[in-house]
Image (tube, helix red, strand yellow):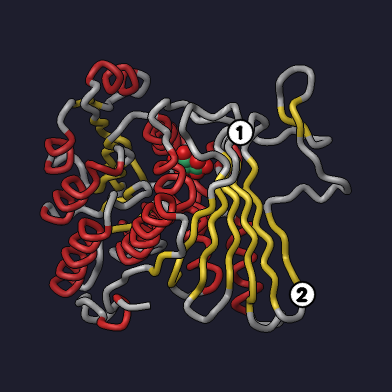
Amino acid sequence: AVVRVGVVGVGIMGADHVERLAGRIAHAELVAVADPDEVRAKELASHHDGVRSTGDALELITSDDVDAVVLASPGFVHEEQVLACLAAGKPVLCEKPLTMDSESSLRIVRADREVEAATGRPLVQVGFMRRFDPEYARLRSVLAGGSLGRTLLLHNVHRNASVPNPDFRSEMIVRDSLVHEVDVARFLFGEEVVSVQVLSPAPTSLAAAGVIDPQVALFTMAGGGIVTNEVFVNSQVGYEVRCEAVAERGSVVIGRPSSGAYSTALAMDGVGQWGGTVPADYRERFATAYDLEVQAWVDSVRAGTSVGPTAWDGYAATAVSTAGMASLASGERVPVDLVDPLTLSQNASSTKE
Ligand code: ISE
């Protein structure tokens, strides 16, 4: 059967998912879009035959003509919308971040566990698309394969040319950008992040006043590995996402062009260059990852199974962001507070360093 999908949120990612679902995803039919900006929702829907629009996300979620939901709304409305999907028994692919704070993410984990206990299948997939990127997936299988020994370090670089939104403050750099590196660290190490420290270098003069950009974040993993992260959202050049994993018997770099010397700068025409072209943004760099992610989700919906990052992965990432926000404010290393994954109750040892 074809999966009838509704998309909530018609911003940059919502519009991108609409194009994908309407054109490139097999066994899916885009039926509806929702956004509080009804004019924009209607405009987007008008490009696709048979797609309706509504200003009411909850109407879309509970509607009989929708089998499954993609949430590309802002993080602060995710809790209500994900819980509505669970109450309606509908699979949901929720863009990151899962929610804005640990407690609300944990409520989603609990609700999804209840659904799983009752029906045998959880309904939440979180949109950490990098897990579907062929390069990250390959890196993960190399590290997990063990031929390089234990993974010791990761070095992540994450740059955006600029951010479209004037509200993109220092905290959003942690919650919306760094959060991808949190998931990458958890995915590649197969361990939780136990502490985070966010350093605040002198900011670029091209960031909005008061915004700390770039930022450098250090993660300590449960097994003692360290992850360094640069996040720089006004780099001017383009979208650069690289990762180098250092293991006992070798290192692997992904996201880096292999043609000799590597440097980026603005060329005369204002386009970032390295002897090729730096992707403009995440929609370009991760186009394949998003396609594979959404196809895997649709396939899992049809098969009655689940795939990809879970509600727990969303919660664990939010918990690191929560600690990261505290560290952004204090400059100190802050322990990550996670509940016990089995009982979902407060883990006594996690509250003390
Ligand atoms: C955006 O929300 C994303 O998820 C992108 O992947 C990230 O690069 C960007 O910094 C965020 O604003």
Q: Position of residue 256 (x, y in %)?
A: 73, 50
The relative height of residue 293 versus residue 118 in the rendered view (above or below) is above
Q: Is residue 288 visible?
A: no
Q: Which residue is mark 2?
A: 250
Q: Disc 1 marks which amino acid?
A: Thr
Q: Which residue is mark 1?
A: 204
- Which residue corresponds to the image point at 18% horizontal and 26% vertical from the top-left? 54
Q: Disc 2 marks which amino acid?
A: Gly
State if disc 2 and disc 1 touch (CB < 8 Å).
no
Q: Position of residue 283 (x, y in %)?
A: 53, 37
Residue furthest out toward the right: 260
Q: Which mark is residue 308?
A: none
Res. 166 image quadrant: top left
Q: Quadrant of the C terminus?
A: bottom left
Tell me if mark 2 has few (under 14), some (14-19) or many (20+) residues whose alpha carbon lies within 10 angstroms of its own.
Answer: few
- Between 150 and 279, which is closer to the camera in this rendering? 150
The relative height of residue 76 versus residue 183 in the rendered view (above or below) is above
- Which residue corresponds to the image point at 42% horizontal and 56% vertical from the top-left? 327
Q: Nearer the viewer, mark 1 or mark 2?
A: 1
- Which residue corresponds to the image point at 59% horizontal and 47% vertical from the top-left? 158
Marks 1 and 2, the one that precedes in the sequence: 1
